[in-house]
Image (cartoon, grey):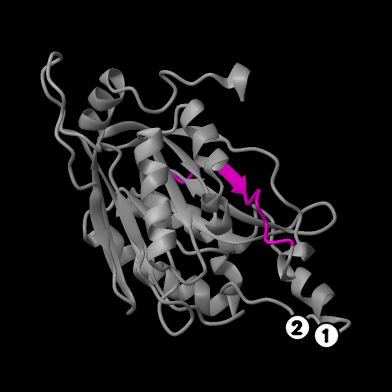
Amino acid sequence: MRTIKVALLLMASCGADIKANHAKGEIFCRRARAGGADIALFPEMWSIGMTFYVPKDAGARERWQAQAISRDDSFITHFRNLARELKMAIAITYLERWNGAPRNSVSLIDRYGENVLTYAKVHTCEFDVECALTPGDSFPVSALDSEEGEVKVGFMICYDREFPESARILMLKGAELILTPNACTLDDHRISQFKTRAVENMVSVAMTNYAAPQNNGHSVAFDAVAYNVKEAEQDGEARDTHIIEAGEAEDVYFASFDLDSIRTYREREAWGNAYRRPRLY
C-alpha cells in the first residue's frame, strides 16, 4: 500500500505581518514533517493572513495590493529551502504580484525545493473585496514526486470548490488529489459540498482553513473511494469517505490517502468521466 500523507496546517494568522506568518508557518511545517507528512497545506493567502483593505479608504486598496510578492521573493525562497531540508512538499499560499492587480495564489514546492505548480484562484469573490484581484485562468495539474511515488495534484482555492466545474476539470486532467486552501466559515453545507466533489470525480480532497477566531477551523479531508472494491461481478458496498475533520483550535491534522486503492477504484467504477455526454451539455 502506497500512502500519501497530507498535513492540514490549521492556524490563525499574525495579520498582515509577513515576517511573523513566515516564522509561524515554518514551525507548523516542522511539526508536519515530524508527524510524517509528505505534503504540508497552508490556508488561503497565508503571506498576509488573508487580510484585506478597507473599501471606504481611498488609498487602502493600493496599499493592500502593494503587499503582493513575486515567486522569487524571500518568503517563497525560504519555504523552498525548508521543503528541501525537510524532504517534504509544501503548498504555500500568498498574494502574488502580477501584471496589473495581484493574484490569490498557491505554489506547490516539491521535496527537492522546486516549484512544480502555481495556481491562481479562478473564482475570485468579485462581489466583495476580491474584485481587487486578477483571477486565474486555468486549472493546472502536476505530477508530484513523493517518497511513495508519483501523485497527480491540482488545486481549488476556497470559493472554487463551490463550482462543480473546478473539480471536474481537474479530474479530466488526471488529478488524483485536490488540495484546497480555504478562508471562510466551514458549515455542514460547505463540507457536504466538498465531500460531493470527491465522490462525483473519484478524487481525494483535502482542505485547510484558518483556526478560530479568524475563521472556524474544521479543516477536512475525504477519500476518493466511495464504494468498497469487490470482484468484477459484484457491486461494492458504500463506505464512509470521511478521513478527518478538525476542530476550531490551532493544530496540525493529518490525512492519509491510499494511492493504490484510489487507482484501482478509478479503473473499474463508473463515476468521473466514464459515461459523460459533453456533446449534450
Which mark, residue 54?
2
Question: Which three-letter amino acid code belongs to the residue tagged 1?
Answer: Lys
Q: Confirm whether the magenta stretch covers residue 114.
A: yes
Give the residue drawn at x 67%, y 57%.
124
Point out residue 257 in the picture as x, y percentages from the top left corner.
Answer: 25, 43
In depth, the one of 129 and 79 nearer the eye is 129
The quadrant in which residue 102 appears is bottom right
Image check: 78 left or right of 95? left
Specify the principal SS of the magenta part: loop
**Discs 2, 1 touching: Cβ within 8 Å:** yes
Point out residue 100 in the picture as x, y percentages from the top left corner.
Answer: 85, 55
The residue wearing badge 1 is 56
Residue 41 visible somewhere in the drawing: no
Give the residue drawn at x 81%, y 75%.
61
Which segment is the magenta one? 112-126
Residue furthest to the top = 233
The quadrant in which residue 50 appears is bottom right
Image check: 13 left or right of 237? right
